[in-house]
Amino acid sequence: MNEPHPPARARALARPLLVALGAALLIAWLGLAWATTRTLAPGSVVSGVDVSGMTRAEAVVAVDKGVGAVLEQPVTLTVDDASDTLVPASSGVSVDADASIDRLTGPTLNPVTLVRRLSGTAVDAVTRVDSDALTRALNARLGTLATGTADAVVTLDGTTPVLTPGSVGTGLDVAASVTALADAWPLGQTTVALASGTANPAVTDAEAQEFIDSVLTPLLSDDITVTAAGTGAAAAAGEVVLSPQAVAALTTIDSTDGALTAVLDADALHDAVVAELGEGIETPATDATWTIDGDPATAATARPVYHAAATGTGIDPDDLADAVLAAGTDDGGDRTATATVAVLQPDVTTPEDDWGIVEIVGEYSTPYVSQYGRDQNLQRGTEMINGTLVAPGETFSTTDALGPVDLEHGYTYAGVVTDGQHTDAMGGGLSQVGTTVFNAGFEAGMDDVEHWPHTYWFTRYPAGREATIWTGVKDVKWRNSTPYTVLVQAWAGDGEVHVRLWSTPYYEVTITEGEHTNYRAYGTVRGSGPGCEPYGGGTQGFDVTVTRTRSHDGVRLPDDVLTTAYDSDNPVVCS
């Protein structure tokens, strides 16, 4: 029997080996191709954002953030010799991070592409351009990038629309510029040249006439009826008829971003409809809040009271305006708008335990001698600030809490010190409220934001720890630097002004008053004439330093050092 020729045997043996080797190479190649879709090779960059070694998900986040930040930066637009700026991200330009990473990880068996990926590849990010948004952004810049261009304008003369024609100019060709930029936004360029040519107005005469014909004319052609029937509201019976004149008075014409729209004054429309339908159709939502008794007869033993939030019912002004516009422009002829009564949600729903209003954290009282006018101001002032809530991080302003200081708001004339002279002025005595507020906050550890000592020392106040106020000029302010809300309680009666702060203890506070030093003698001042006001006076001036130390959880904060120099309070004799 003849044996096979040796080369033939070798070829027979090599054939399965080659098949096996080819299969192994194919598997390896497929594995390599698959791997490049999962992890980016070193040196992989997308428009300057290094995504080396990242997973696909990580790279998408990095590109979205990095390229997105570039699009947040303003670029300079140029047309001929004119220029303006634009923020791409605010003008319809965005990055498609997924598509951008696909350029590095998209499935492929192309050996050249795979080799490039393995060695690190730099690609441009994929950007998307919202043509409508970019058109609006460029239209808004016609004033600087074009000359001779003016929008058509629509106004109302009573119920009659009036069209003032626009004009075509030269400079920025918005349509051509948008077409060019929509294909490929020049990412990374700080200056973008736009197309120059005919500058059409953002609002053309034809668009303005179409707006008149399709919106204004039907809107103002006849009465519009507003009803709450079918809403389930207790007071839903009845209806409101809005005449064309009434609708016209509520209508403004907006051309923002180059699009004409009719806008109804939603709040005024709401108020008019509710007044006709009856106030009972609405029940306002109430926020969660706290109150505290400020009655001088009972305030000393009062405690804060929590009031939970509650939903209400009412007509949404914006929804009502939309319904009236729709009814007035509906081709169907049914000019009836339904004022839908919806559930109103409160803005503040914080549960009772989350406020931290549990006990007194700072309080102070100052004595006063009853005087006509002054008593009224002290009582009205404490009434106004009582119940004020100060959230964590917020600053309490005494003058803001007091409100307008005038006769109409319950204040009157009483004694004040102005430019060193004792006289009467509106709101005299309110500095005692300010002083008591300051000390309650100081005792509680609140941050001292603003306070102004008096020129002279009044013995009813602690030396170096008192404050004057003058609306619009001088205020007493402290900041709630704790994580808990503060409730202010205040009242005046039985010869004392009281202020308490209710919250959760946060600071450990120690206050030390130094010695009175550098005394300055007073001397009698003699005056005459109708403007002279006699004054008993007779108090020496001096210097004093007050130091407050604060700590929280054993950590001491920097000391607050208040150094005050009081002038001598001179008596005045008139002749």
Image (cartoon, helix red, strand yellow):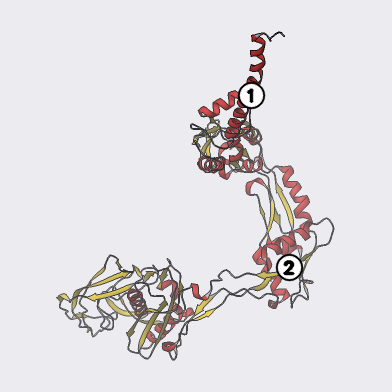
Residue 404 appears in the rendering: no
| Residue 203 location, quadrant | top right
Q: Is residue 280 above or below residue 191?
A: below
Left or right placement of residue 530 versus residue 174 in this view: left
Q: Nearer the viewer, residue 414 or 347?
A: 347
Neighbourhood count class around disc 2 (C-alpha, 10 Å): few under 14, some 14–19, many 20 upward: many
- Ranked by sequence position, the earlier of labels 1 and 2 is 1
Callout 1 amino acid: Ala
Residue 539 appears in the rendering: yes
Residue 223 placed where, x, y %? Answer: 79, 64
Q: Nearer the viewer, residue 90 or 217?
A: 90
Residue 228 placed where, x, y %? Answer: 76, 71
Q: Is residue 507 above or below residue 136?
A: below
Callout 2 amino acid: Thr
Residue 113 placed where, x, y %? Answer: 59, 26
Residue 492 placed where, x, y %? Answer: 40, 86
Q: Residue at x 28, y 82 (%)?
A: 533
Numbered label attached to residue 163: none
Left or right placement of residue 28 versus residue 427 in this view: right
| Residue 516 location, quadrant | bottom left
Separation of residues labelled 1 and 2 (CA atoms): 76 Å
Left or right placement of residue 442 versus residue 282 in this view: left
Numbered disc 1: secondary structure: helix
Tell me the residue that label 2 is attached to: 340
From the viewer's perspective, is the residue at label 1 or at label 2 nearer?
Answer: 1
| Residue 470 location, quadrant | bottom left
Q: Quadrant of the C terminus?
A: bottom left
Numbered label attached to residue 20: 1
